[in-house]
Every structure is written in C-alpha cells, then in structure tokens.
Amino acid sequence: MRIGVTDQGEISKELVKVFKDQEVVYVPNPASVIREKPEVIVHTAEIPFWESNSDPPKAWSTNTWMAINIARAGSKIGAVNVYPSTFMVYNGKKGYYLEHNTPHPLNYYGLSKLAAETGIASLGNYLIMRVGALYSLSYEGILKSFIKASFLGRRIRCPSEMFISPISIYTFAIILEKLIKNGIKGFINVSGPRRQCWTFALRYQTYLVMTLRKLKCPI
C-alpha cells in the first residue's frame, strides 16, 4: 500500500515508523497527489491550535482550503482521504461525544477543521478522525503549555472542572494504522480516557521528573 502524507512534521514521522512495511510518500499539493498516486492520503499538514486562533487566514489556507484541494485530487485517483480532525469541533459542555453529536466549535482552530471535514466528506471515500487532545514533548497542541511548564518545573494552573481526553501521537498513529488496514471509513471519534486536566498535568509532570532523574539530568 502506498500512503501519502501532506507534510513532514511530527505526526508524519510517527506514521512512517508505524507503516514500516508500506511505502510512505510526500504529497504537499494536488499535483504531487496526481503524480505519486497514493492509495491513501493522510492529511497531516495543519496550522496548530495556538497559531490558528491568532492567525485565522493562515489556518483557513492550510487546515481547510489546502486540505480540501488535496482531497479533490485524491478523489480523482480513487484514494481514501484520511483527515485527522479535532475534538474541538464540539463545544466541550457535554463530554463523551459520539460521532452523530452536533458540532459547535468555540475557536477558529475547531472551525477550520470542521469546514474541512464538510468538504472532504462531500467527496466520499473518506475517514475523518475527531481526535482527542494530541500530545508529545514537542507537539504544538492544546497541551503544549502544560507540558512545557512541566518540563521546566513551573507551577501548572488549570481549572478543576476542565476535562480532556488526551492521546499521545504514538497511540494515535497505531490506531490510525489499524483503521486504514481494516478499511474503516466514515467519522470516528478517537481519544484516550477522559481525565481532569489538572490530574493529567500532575501525572505528566511527575513522569518528566522521574525520567530526568533516571537520565541524571539537573532538575
């Protein structure tokens, strides 16, 4: 199977590791999709949460417009368009969202992703994954500030009534690989266990401290 990725960032690099028995090609634009002819396109390129909300035109250009145009090229060659969307298409007031629940984004990042979902779904032959709070040590997601504060040993502040469903980029890549290999299509909500935000932050900080001690790094 030939897998196309639309950028060469952190998620794409993790997918290359997971799809070790498959050919992964770089398709950053519609022309490259037509040329490389991947069987599956994973739309990994995005403007992350913080930057999307501070620069909406940039977010719309990449998260929405570019994604739809690449998907249109993919549709022409019969490729499956896999679009990693976000839990932020919902407003977060209810929790435990199912795929049929009504979207209601509260920020521009969520809005740009929802608009792309609509365009890609209209083409058919798609897998749209509404992913929980993605994280890693370097990922530019919603948990970036908590992870950075943990790494620097700073005090973390977050409301006790705030809940998230974090999922590591590695776990996301493993799940995505299984969905693609099994030919799953449509809308799928994917996340880790629901947790209080401050509990996640505390556990992550504890993990980092223990790891640094094992590596004998100053903390």
Image (cartoon, grey):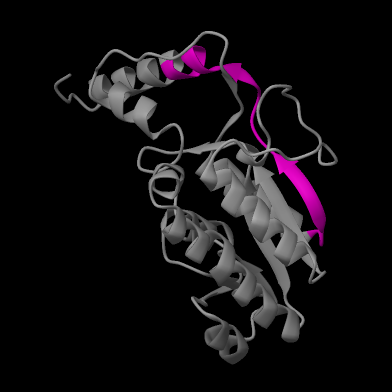
Q: Quadrant of residue 40?
A: bottom right
Q: Is residue 6 above or below residue 90?
A: below
The spot of residue 2 in percent (x, y) is: 63, 77
Where does the image place residue 93, in percent across and percent down from the top left? 69, 22
In which image quadrant can residue 95 be found?
A: top right
The image shows a total of numbered marks equal to 0
Horizontal and vertical percent position of residue 169? 52, 44
Q: Is residue 185 magenta?
A: yes
Q: Is residue 66 magenta?
A: no
Work out which quarter of the rendered image holds the N terminus and state it. Answer: bottom right
The extreme top residue here reads: 160
Residue at the far right: name it: 100
Residue shown at the point (39%, 48%) measured from the top left: 51
Decide: is 202 above or below 65.
above
Seen from this angle, which residue lies furthest left?
Answer: 218
The residue at the point 36 percent across, 18 percent down is 205
The spot of residue 56 in percent (x, y) is 45, 53
Residue that sits furthest to the bottom in the current view: 35
Image position of 99 (left or right of 108): right
Quadrant where the C terminus sits is top left
Q: Is residue 184 left or right of residue 180?
A: right
For the point 61% across and 28% down, the residue is 165
Q: Residue at 40% of width from left, 42% of height from top?
A: 50
Q: Is residue 168 above or below residue 84?
A: above
Left or right of 188, for residue 90: left
The foreground one among 74 and 67 is 67
The answer to whether 14 is drawn above or below residue 27 in the figure is above
Part of the protein shown in magenta: 182-201
